[in-house]
Amino acid sequence: MRSHTSLWRWVLGAGLIVTPAVYLVPRGGVLWLVVSLGTKAAMLLALALGVRLHRPAHASPWWVLVAGTFLYFVGDGIRYPAQAGFFALSHPSVADAFYLTGYTVVLVGLGMLIHRRSGRPDWGGSLDALIVAGAVGVLWWLFLIDPYIDDTSASEFAKLVSAAYPLTGLLLLTAAVRLAFIPGARNTAAWFLGISLAAQLLADTTYSITLLGGSFSPGSPAFAGWMAAFTFLAAATLHPSMRNLSEPIAELDRPPPRWRVPLIMAVALIPPATLVVDGGRHGHVRLIAGGSAALIVLAMARVSVLIGDVRRAQARLRQTERQYRTLVEQVPSVVYTAEYGESGRWYYVSPRIESMLGFTPEEWLADPDLWYERMVPEDRERAMADDTRSRTSGEPLQSEYRLRARDGRVVWVRDEAEAVLDDEGNRVFHHGILIDITLRRHAEDSVGRLAAELEQRVAERTAELEAANQELREAKDVAERANRAKSEFLSRMSHELRTPLNAILGFGQLLETSALSPDDDESAQQILKGGRHLLDLINEVLDIARIESRSLTLSPEPVSVDDVVREAVDLILPLAAERGIELRLDPSDPSRFVLADRQRLKQVMLNLLANAVKYNREGGSVTVFYHLDLPDHLSIWVSDTGPGIAPEDRERLFLPFDRLDADRGGVEGTGLGLALTKALVEAMHGTIGVESELGRGSAFWVSLPLEDAPDAGTAREAPSEPLVAGSLQVRTVLCIEQHPSDLTLMERLLANRPGVKLLTTIQGRMALDLAREHAPDLIVLDVDLPDISGEEVVRRLRGDPATRKTPVIVTSADCTEGQMRRLFAAGANEYLTKPLDVQRFLETVGEALGAAPKLEVEEHVVGGPVSA
Ligand code: ADP
């Protein structure tokens, strides 16, 4: 491809070098013949090669040109040897036939090219070409054709053939001019083609003139012209731009260049001018006058075509103008052109101005100050600043301001404009639009107002919420304080109630063990029953209160359900046996662990089992079984064969002090057990429920989260050291007790123990002295003392080497876990809550003192009077 594109340079270069070189060889000789004809043959080949190589979309005009040129060449092939004197050639000869046919074919080729390229008729261009050809034709006739016609020596046929050359040359000229006048940029191939045609015409003219002058010979410059014509034609077809030459031009509507009309007119004036110069010759006047008249006709035709063109152009312009005007007037905004500044002239304003502001465009244009005057005064400064900025910087104008309409309405407008430059590049005015944005501005204002209102409301609500929150916080504080007060009150009350109960139950149990008459024994039993009931009530109320005030501390751990259930069942067995009720433990899946507080779970099971035994029929049974609540819970079921619970009563079951109608059935109870049980289960993140059928029995269930079995190493540690005392025969027990009744109870209880020497005191400090002095085997210590606290006493005992090892049993009406932990931490060995379970107390003392204490009692009352 690259080699094609530069081939034309080589051919052109070679042709242009060889053409003058022909004049260096002896003219008319064989070498001359070979070089001239050889070069032409080579150019002819190059010509055909160019058409082959570039393959234009419309190749036919080019092939026709090639054919015409070939015919020239054949003519040359006959004429040149005759010129060189090889043989004589008469006039006219066969060579003339080839030449004239060649001309015709080339003319056809050019016609095809013109037709293709111009795409549609261009009368102006054709007329121009005809005027030029007419003017040149007149001259030609005058100087080239007329002499032949006048030649009396030649035959008529010879005259005709001679005259045919300038005539066909004239046609060629017309075609060349027509081709040149097709509007649009000319490419290289077009230029080469034009040069080729010009060279041909020049050569033909020269030939005719020299022939007429009788000086034509192989040295004539006409030969160079013909070779140049071949060379440029070859270069034109070899040049790549030849492909575009036979394509229709794009710019059809382009007006002819300005120089065209004066040029044509000047050319048309040549014949009359010639007449003036050559006015004397006869016959020529008519010819030139006739030619000039024809030219005038042509020129007039041309002018009328031009006028038509102008009219059409004007019509087109009007139509476009109408289109744009409608467009501008349809725009739902005002379109304008105006000078800058407050009293700048307005050149145009679209009719919309009337519906927008109530002024007609004429009124608006007539008064340059109107715009500034109608502007709301507060907006003027800003609008003028925008105007000035756009003018000085050249940036587009964008401004929003208010204009007062004729009827007083305020119209918000957005002014958008471009600065327009004059020929010197100065900014002269604005092309712009005024858009009515009143609605948008109102909408924005309302949105703004609404947003502000909304903000205001949000602020108010936030403040209200804040206040409500504050109230809630205060209420919560009050509630928490009340709760704390309640739980403090309850534990204080429980403490206060336990102290007298200690005496009631303690002495009652003492009486129980004494030999009493049946009536007295009955009385003692009633005292104990009443006391125990009261104690249950106190314990349960306290637990519920603790759970409610969230002061109950739980120690959740993996608990073996089976272990706990078995322990609870063991404890209930005596009660069940007493009532002739069978207790069954379903052995399925005993190895489960749940996450719970061991003690509290046992308490839950004891409650449910006790109820199942209490509310059962004679000879009935209680069954405990487990159920896996997938995926991660286990429920423990306690099912009985009692009377069952009516569906409407089930909701009341868990309410405190609601015993349904158990009181009537004579079954003892507080009505607190299930309420406490439910509270405990829920505190351990479990659930409790009941299923029951009247007359068949009830089944209570507790569901708790399953837990993995604990590692083998984490067995529960013993809370305290085992109670080990010395193996002395007489054991000294130091008893520190503030309440006289409790002190008396201690004395009575321990008085029954053989081999025990009892030392008593009501003060802590005194107790410490006694302990140091007497080195007792056991210390029984009440926590509430008038001077120092029991905890402090334990700590000091443990701090003294003499008493470091002495076993200490703490007794207290305070059964809170915190207190127990503190005392164990201080060094207590055992913690017994009051009212004392006499049996348990005696066992604990027995363990501490070792087996078989001696029957000896010695009482020491130190530190104040003791009244029984
Ligand atoms: P208490 O047993 O001290 O009365 P509870 O809170 O344990 O209090 O039980 C409340 C009431 O629920 C009982 O008085 C009794 O009427 C009823 N109840 C509890 N368990 C059963 C049961 N297994 N079968 C029938 N009724 C029961």
Image (spheres, rainbow, N blue to C red):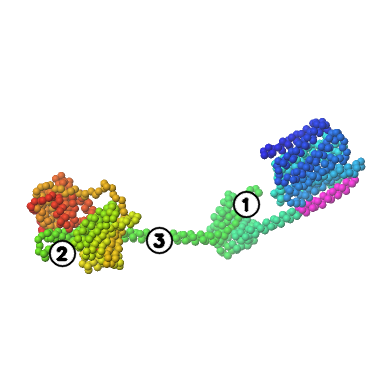
- The quadrant in which the N terminus is found is top right
- Circle 3 SS class: helix
Give amino acid for label 2: Gln
Pick whichever, 308 or 410, lies toward us: 308
Q: Relative to 205, is 359 on the left or the right?
A: left
Mark 2 C-beta to ligand 1 under 8 Å: no
Q: Earlier in the sequence, mark 1 or mark 3?
A: 1
Q: Earlier in the sequence, mark 1 or mark 2?
A: 1
Give amino acid for label 1: Val
- Circle 2 SS class: helix
Looking at the image, which residue is at 83% across and 50% down? 294
Give amino acid for label 3: Arg
The mark tally for this picture is 3
**Residue at numbered disc 1:** 420
Q: Position of residue 524 (x, y in %)?
A: 13, 63
Q: Earlier in the sequence, mark 2 or mark 3?
A: 3
Q: Relative to 53, is 777 on the left or the right?
A: left
Neighbour class for label 2 at 10 Å: few (<14), some, many (≥20)?
A: few
Q: Position of residue 73 (x, y in %)?
A: 80, 39
**Residue at numbered disc 3:** 461
Gap between marks 1 and 3 measured at Cα:
56 Å
Q: Position of residue 353 (x, y in %)?
A: 61, 61
User: Tags 2 and 3 in contact by the CB under 8 Å rule?
Assistant: no
**Residue at numbered disc 2:** 526
- Circle 1 SS class: strand
547 relative to 127, above or below = below
